[in-house]
Amino acid sequence: MITIEMKIDLFEKMIEERHLVERRQHLEQLKIQYAQLLDEMAVKYEAQRREKLVHLERKVTLEMSQLEAREKVSIQRLIRENEAWLVRRLVEAVKAEWKERIKSERYKAAFLMHFERLTADISSKIQSVWVSPMDFQLIPVRYNPVVSEEIIGGFIIRCEGNQQVDYTINRQLEEMSLKLGCMIDHLISDGGACHEQK
């Protein structure tokens, strides 16, 4: 026979099982919600990580470009400094050579030949002739010779109407300096020769 106590025990077990089933269902729902939350967080984290990686990659690319540009400018500046130093050295060597040559008789003969050739057509228009102290005695007094310590050799003829003929070694050295700079630029940049602009 079934006693009341047995019925109560059975009823309690049924209630406990029911609570146990409800708890398991509730636990399963929590597990599912937790898994969904983890998946959402993983997706969100992955998106943030990708975004940060893209941003970081752009930043690194920009910094590398800036660094490369600074290096190119630095290299170009160094090349220009070395080029200028080389041109100055060459011009100074040529200038020193010319300072020795202007003392020779050959220089004086060439000076007079060029002076006479250039003054043949414009002698009536000449107002003054600027020369170095070494060349002063080579110019006839009628051309109003003027001494200039800056002139290494050669002459500058100043005519009426602010016209001027510069046949000085100084001008030739300046032209040589420009040509040397141009030649060095072209040799460094593309290995070609310097083309004069006309």
Image: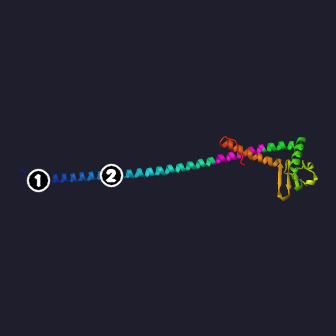
Residue 126 appears in the figure: no
Q: Secondary structure at mark 1?
A: helix
Question: Looking at the image, do the residues carrying marks 1 and 2 touch, with CB atoms under 8 Å apart?
Answer: no
Magenta stretch: give its range.
73-90
Q: Is 39 in front, or is 194?
A: 194
Residue, far left: 1
Q: Is residue 148 above or below residue 193?
A: below
Residue occupied by mark 1: 7
Amino acid on which disc 1 is placed = Lys
Q: Is residue 158 above or below residue 90?
A: below
Q: Could you tell whether 38 is left or right of 189 in the image?
A: left
Q: Secondary structure at mark 2?
A: helix
Q: Could you tell whether 119 is left or right of 41 in the image?
A: right
| Residue 192 rendering spot, x and y as whole percentages | 67, 41
Residue occupied by mark 2: 36
| Residue 66 rendering spot, x and y as whole percentages | 58, 50
